[in-house]
Amino acid sequence: MANITNKHKERIPLLKIEQTIRRILPLDEEAMREAARRLDRLTKPPGSLGRLEELAVQLAGITGDADLKPMAKAIVVMAADHGVCEEGVSAFPQEVTRQMVHNFLAGGAAINVLARQTGAEVVCVDIGVKGELEDDRLISRKVRQGTANMAREAAMSREEAERAIEIGIELAEILAGKGIRLFATGEMGIGNTTPSAAVLSVLSDVDAEDAVGRGTGIDDAGMKRKQATIRKAIALNVPDASDAIDVLAKVGGLELAGLAGLVLGAAANRRPVVIDGFISTVAALAACRIAPAAKEYLIPSHLSEEKGHRVALKELGLEPMLSLKMRLGEGSGAVLAFPLIDAAGNVLREMATFDSAGVSRG
């Protein structure tokens, strides 16, 4: 959003994360019951709209509104670089992260095209891109110039991971205050499937082989190198699987931590969050390990071709709505789910009941 200030504020107290966790409440059961009752009165066999009906009930519970008014939408694209690229884990050079940020800001990326189609806004955030970016359209929240090489040392300090989480919370609060009622998670960061796979490997207790995919299109030798790099990073840094912030700090990424914070902040403000593919889902998994109640606010969009995405979704107990063989990231799959979410609300608001239409019940 153009009117989000880029001025650096004083550091949010560490207590912010704990305060946000306490604000994440269970879904509104009365609103869910009212939405379910209304769906059963509509001119259709009960449950015949399947997951659209489930989605309508979930949205009513999240928002506390059984009327499901149209929602202003934003895709938050967190951008950051990764020191682990030094290990040769990506098919693209690191400077592509910075170049793609400029592409987002100019409106030329896939996410921009898809967002325009759905009437959504793209909010691009520099949370850790290597190098300086100067653009009034960019939300500048850089924690550091990319992470360190996790195969040689911790990706970042715990304080930096906490700061990135807090930035995500802060942005959710700002956007919610400006009228955004539906969030989607997006990211950009060359090499970021490697830390995502590492975080997933630790949090879900699976081997790197089950978590690692081809990312930007690496070959078989690159896959083996990527797996070995992840195993080395985990053995070196010994992240604590019971402490998601420790995992993010030691083998994660700044955009992962930022998106985890966005999930927490959106949930605390009773906003649904549409999660994109592999990287976004791993960030959501970390958020739910920090605050399990946040899971009820998640809407899974699509099934990525990235191998670890199934593992992450299974760990969260979520089933995606779409399967389009996509693996782009950026939030591209999440934004394609927006029309389904709009459809769920439209059905609840606009469809005739048996009584109003004069239709006999079965």
Image (cartoon, grey):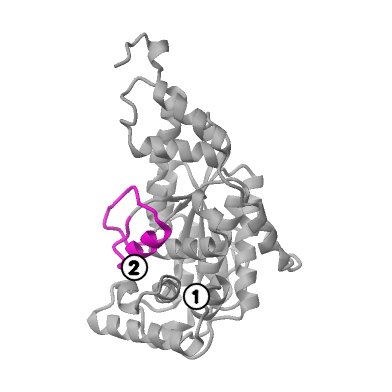
Going by the numbered disc 1, the residue's amino acid type is Ala
Q: In which quarter of the image is the C terminus?
A: top left
Q: Residue furthest right?
A: 10
- Using the numbered discs, state the Cα–Cα distance from disc 1 to disc 2 in whole angstroms: 17 Å
Which mark, by number, is residue 308? 2
Does the rendering let one see residue 307? yes
For the record, the magenta segment spans 303-329
Which structural element holds mark 2? helix
Going by the numbered disc 2, the residue's amino acid type is Gly
Residue 133, horizontal then vertical, whole percent: 57, 70
Q: Which residue lies furthest to the left in this view?
A: 220
Give whichever of discs 1 and 2 has the lower sequence position: 1
What residue do we see at 35% from left, 63% from top?
309
Tell me if residue 141 is in the magenta stretch.
Answer: no
Tell me if residue 324 is in the magenta stretch.
Answer: yes
Left or right for 36, reference 291: left
Which structural element holds mark 1? loop
Q: Main secondary structure of the magenta part?
A: loop
Left or right for 255, reference 48: right
Q: In this view, does 231 lie above or below 332?
A: below
Q: Who is closer to the viewer here, 335 or 311?
A: 311
What residue do we see at 38% from left, 59% from top?
313
Q: How crowded is mark 1: few (under 14 residues within 10 Å), some or many (20 or more)?
A: some
Q: Write down the residue under mark 1.
A: 241
